[in-house]
Image: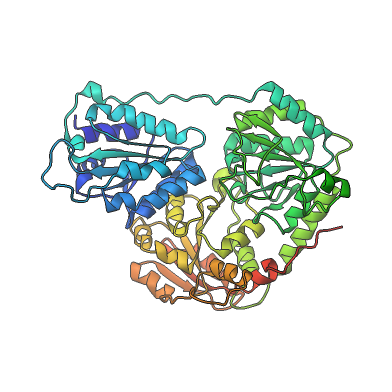
């Protein structure tokens, strides 16, 4: 059997359904083996986009998505996608080609040290030097990609290795075995129960690591039993339905928002699944005895204790140093806590509920604003209404976000109904991933509405993948928020007091741009037009682009350097 065929059979054995690829000469044997396999080859227009798509498959399914490129520039174009998956804990397998290693006629043409380049941005990277090693290395790559903390892995398959013949016995895939995660030690669980029951105002934080079906279910049961309010990080959105009466908000920033009023009031934070790779949802401060004696404002000095609940121990940082760590399978830990804990009469959550009311009133203030160009609050509210789905997990629709100022508004104002219903990146926070992620989401969940929200800058970084969506006949909708500049950096520029400089650009006519690819183009022309355009867009059976002007002047009003949130009394 040809080694490339053995490799593809190993991918099938691992459950791979798609390979996102920009192939080259060095992996034509792999492409030929894919032709007769059960795996769909999804040709993309850039390797970075292929990596984003594969990472999103991993994020949505928990099984590594697979991306393929050639050597040299094809491999280096994977680097951003590798970092995206690695920091975002998305299981991803990247496969790159290489010139023959047992003899060749092209010298060092296109050859770079790909394995060495991949080391800093992957969990595992290896060159296959013998076709007989393909089954074991493929199993090992998948195992490591899925293992906590999930991330990116890489295999380099040289051209001559892919083409060589190996025996059927050597080509046999290794059995895929499911390893049970270790559970938390009972003494740590008992300590956590004691700390929670002793606290006066405990508060639950839900992070990205809790974004698993069983963990989501256990958290919902724990919250129902204890009635402890909860908030989440940006990447923890939707783990528990944010329409829940005990949900008090998302930490879109590290400080100075309404949710931080509640955080400052808490004397214990139960941190479920968050680590310091994601941008901090709050800042821990080491307080002196003098600070505590003087009773300094808790909004400035947050002395709350933190329980770290995760698959792995805490990475201590200046902003994060938990007092207790409960390490093991998160779902099992939450189940153990739920079984042992009893609701306490002295718990007081009244302040958290005042914060929740204040935040919701604030969000509602401008949800129907008639300003044009549209302000972010109106855009989020209209998207929220347009994405309402049917009951059941598989009917929850999906919004994928690129990276820009609108991401903060969506993280803060958008209520997610379930796991992975709002896909954003708050780890690498790269631009250019919104459209590729939407394509992958629609492939995985064809029955769901899928909307990509992109800034004009981020969209243009991988806009060529619109052709991929058209070719695959995927009825996704892409909402482009147009401000003709890098809006988030302009906001930072203004906050620092710098003059407006160097961040404006021009744009194509996005309606004509969409139609040039064979997609449908729509344009928002008034404040009340977005809802109608979204409704119309989801009625088409092809990709649709909606161009929507946005006014980011609200950024400074809400998060300017002189703005200070007034906490409820």
The quarter of the picture where the N terminus appears is top left
Placement of 29 over or under 384, stated as above or below: above
Q: Nearer the viewer, residue 31 or 387?
A: 31
- Please tell me which residue is depicted at 42% across the width and 60% down the height of the picture: 541
- Please tell me which residue is depicted at 65% across the width and 39% down the height of the picture: 272
Residue 265 appearing in the image? yes
Please provide percent x and percent y for residue 501. Answer: 51, 76
Q: Is residue 9 left or right of residue 190?
A: left
Q: Is residue 82 left or right of residue 205?
A: left
Please provide percent x and percent y for residue 200. Answer: 85, 40
Please provide percent x and percent y for residue 345. Answer: 89, 36
Q: Nearer the viewer, residue 469 or 461?
A: 461
Model colouring: rainbow
Q: Nearer the viewer, residue 417 or 45?
A: 45
Placement of 466 over or under 335, stated as above or below: below
- Please tell me which residue is depicted at 50% across the width and 42% down the height of the picture: 89
Q: Nearer the viewer, residue 360 or 232?
A: 232
Q: Is residue 27 left or right of residue 207?
A: left
Placement of 7 over or under 46, stated as above or below: above
- Please tell me which residue is depicted at 47% across the width and 62% down the height of the picture: 477
Please provide percent x and percent y for residue 358. Answer: 79, 59
């Amino acid at each position: 059997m040809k080694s490339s065929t053995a490799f593809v059979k190993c991918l099938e054995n691992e459950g791979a359904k798609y390979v996102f690829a920009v192939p080259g000469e060095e992996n034509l044997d792999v492409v030929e083996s894919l032709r007769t396999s059960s795996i769909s080859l999804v040709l993309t227009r850039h390797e970075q986009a292929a990596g984003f798509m594969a990472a999103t498959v991993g994020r949505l399914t928990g099984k590594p998505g697979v991306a393929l490129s050639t050597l040299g520039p094809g491999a280096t174009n994977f680097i951003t996608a590798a970092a995206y998956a690695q920091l975002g804990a998305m299981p991803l397998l990247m496969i790159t080609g290489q010139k023959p290693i047992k003899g060749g006629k092209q010298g060092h043409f296109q050859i770079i040290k790909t394995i060495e380049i991949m080391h800093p941005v992957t969990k595992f990277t290896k060159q296959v030097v013998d076709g007989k090693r393909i089954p074991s290395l493929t199993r090992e790559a998948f195992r490591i990609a899925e293992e906590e903390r999930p991330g990116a892995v890489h295999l380099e398959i040289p051209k001559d290795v892919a083409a060589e013949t190996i025996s059927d016995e050597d080509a046999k895939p290794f059995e895929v075995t499911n390893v049970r995660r270790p559970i938390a030690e009972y003494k740590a669980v008992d300590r956590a129960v004691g700390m929670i029951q002793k606290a006066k105002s405990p508060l639950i934080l839900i992070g990205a690591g809790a974004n698993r079906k069983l963990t989501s279910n256990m958290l919902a049961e724990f919250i129902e039993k204890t009635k402890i309010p909860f908030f989440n990080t940006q990447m923890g959105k939707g783990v528990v339905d944010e329409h829940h009466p005990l949900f008090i908000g998302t930490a879109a920033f590290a400080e100075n928002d309404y949710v931080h009023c509640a955080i400052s009031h808490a004397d214990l934070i139960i941190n479920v699944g968050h680590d310091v790779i994601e941008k901090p949802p709050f800042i821990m401060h080491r307080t002196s005895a003098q600070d505590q004696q003087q009773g300094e404002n808790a909004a400035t000095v947050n002395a709350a204790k933190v329980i770290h609940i995760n698959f792995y121990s805490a990475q201590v940082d200046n902003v994060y140093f938990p007092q207790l760590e409960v390490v093991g399978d998160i779902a099992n830990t939450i189940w153990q806590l739920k079984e042992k804990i009893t609701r306490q009469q002295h718990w007081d959550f009244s302040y958290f509920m005042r914060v929740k009311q204040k935040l919701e009133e604030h969000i509602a203030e401008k949800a129907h604003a008639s300003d044009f160009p549209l302000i972010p609050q109106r855009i989020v509210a209209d998207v929220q209404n347009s994405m309402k789905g049917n009951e059941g997990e598989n009917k929850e629709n999906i919004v994928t976000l690129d990276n820009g100022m609108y991401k903060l508004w969506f993280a803060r104002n958008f209520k997610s109904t379930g796991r992975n219903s709002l896909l954003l990146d708050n780890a690498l926070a790269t631009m250019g991933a919104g459209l590729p992620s939407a394509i992958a989401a629609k492939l995985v969940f064809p029955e769901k509405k899928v909307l990509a929200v992109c800034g004009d800058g981020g969209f243009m970084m991988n806009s060529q993948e619109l052709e991929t969506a058209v070719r695959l006949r995927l009825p996704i909708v892409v909402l482009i928020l147009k401000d003709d500049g890098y809006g988030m950096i302009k906001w930072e520029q203004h906050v620092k007091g710098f003059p407006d400089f160097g961040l404006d650009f021009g744009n194509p006519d996005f309606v004509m741009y969409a139609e040039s690819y064979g997609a449908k183009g729509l344009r928002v022309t008034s404040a009340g037009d977005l809802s109608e355009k979204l409704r119309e867009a989801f009625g088409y059976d092809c990709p649709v682009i909606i161009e929507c002007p946005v006014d980011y002047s609200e950024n400074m009003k809400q998060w300017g350097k002189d703005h200070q949130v007034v906490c409820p009394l």
